[in-house]
Image: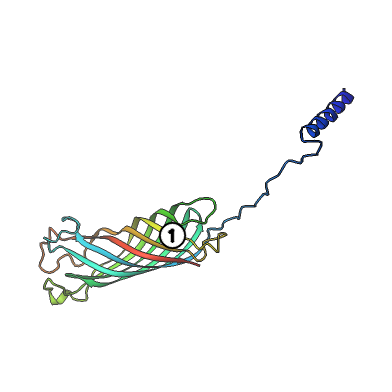
Amino acid sequence: MKRIIAVGSVILAFNSMAMAGGKVVVPAVAPVIPLVKHDSSGVYVSGAIYYNNVYSDNYSWFDDAQDTQDELAGVTLIAGYEYNEYLAFEARASKSFFQEDYADEYHFSFFLKPQYKFRDDAYQEDYISVYALLGFGYVNVEGTDGNTPGAPEIIGKTIVDDWQFQYGIGISYTFTDKDHPENDSGDWSIFAEYTMYMDSQSMNPKRLYDYNLNAYDELSMNGLSVGVSYHF
């Protein structure tokens, strides 16, 4: 049986040579290019400008008709560590530099950042990411004298001073560094996000600027941010 198989193999080889004009044809083999293993872990820093709203829970968000809300603008500095393709950690520090009426604030945040990146396996193209922010933070709101006349006894005094559960959602667009396909080093990102910093926190004191105590005994703070990040 083995002898029959061997003879058949020889006949098949001669037939192949005959079909190729008597020349032995070696099948072409495409070169195998090994894929570069991409490492998404690394440190990044960000800077952002935010537009926040501090408001009484009894009134709607950005309700300019009510004195029980204030609009703030400020800056945020972020230090982050990307653990892998799908998860990062962030520490944030923020301070307002503009307030319309009564509130001056600063806050710190620590976030777990699950994320999803819409990019190809070659890691060579710019891409979009979506992410969530889940964590906790410290919020401090002080009274100040803005467009609404403030009672002198509240200026500089603490209105809210507490730790809160915080959360948010965001989207970013990343410009990849084509010279480093093996990692995210050198990548720049722009991002926009919504964050809830404080939800229904009791005020101290509970009377502010002679507003109705029944309408103004709890504060919330949320807002929008836009910024830029750099990956090391």
Secondary structure state at the residue bearing disc 1: strand
Taking the image as shown, residue 200 lies to the left or right of residue 169, namely: left
Residue 39 image-quadrant placement: bottom right
- Rendered view: 154 above or below 119: below
Mark 1 is on which residue type? Thr
Q: Is residue 146 visible?
A: yes
Q: Position of residue 43 (x, y in %)?
A: 49, 65
* The one of 55 and 1 positioned closer to us in this rendering: 1
Residue at point 57% right, 59% down? Answer: 182
* The one of 184 and 65 positioned closer to us in this rendering: 184
Residue 212 image-quadrant placement: bottom left
Q: Position of residue 133 (x, y in %)?
A: 38, 56
Q: Which residue is mark 1?
A: 174
Residue at point 67% right, 49% down? Answer: 32
Neighbour tally class for label 1: few under 14, some 14-19, many 20 plus, Cα within 10 Å: many
Q: Position of residue 224 (x, y in %)?
A: 29, 60
Residue 174 image-quadrant placement: bottom left
The figure's colour scheme reads rainbow
Q: Is residue 142 visible?
A: no
Taking the image as shown, residue 80 lies to the left or right of residue 6, namely: left
Q: Position of residue 10 (x, y in %)?
A: 85, 30
* The one of 21 and 107 positioned closer to us in this rendering: 21
Please identify the residue farthest to the front as the structure is shown.
21
Residue at point 47% right, 66% down? Answer: 44
Question: In the picture, which quadrant includes the N terminus?
Answer: top right
Taking the image as shown, residue 159 lies to the left or right of residue 118, namely: left
- Rendered view: 210 above or below 83: below
Please identify the residue farthest to the right as the structure is shown.
3
Residue at point 77% right, 35% down? Answer: 20
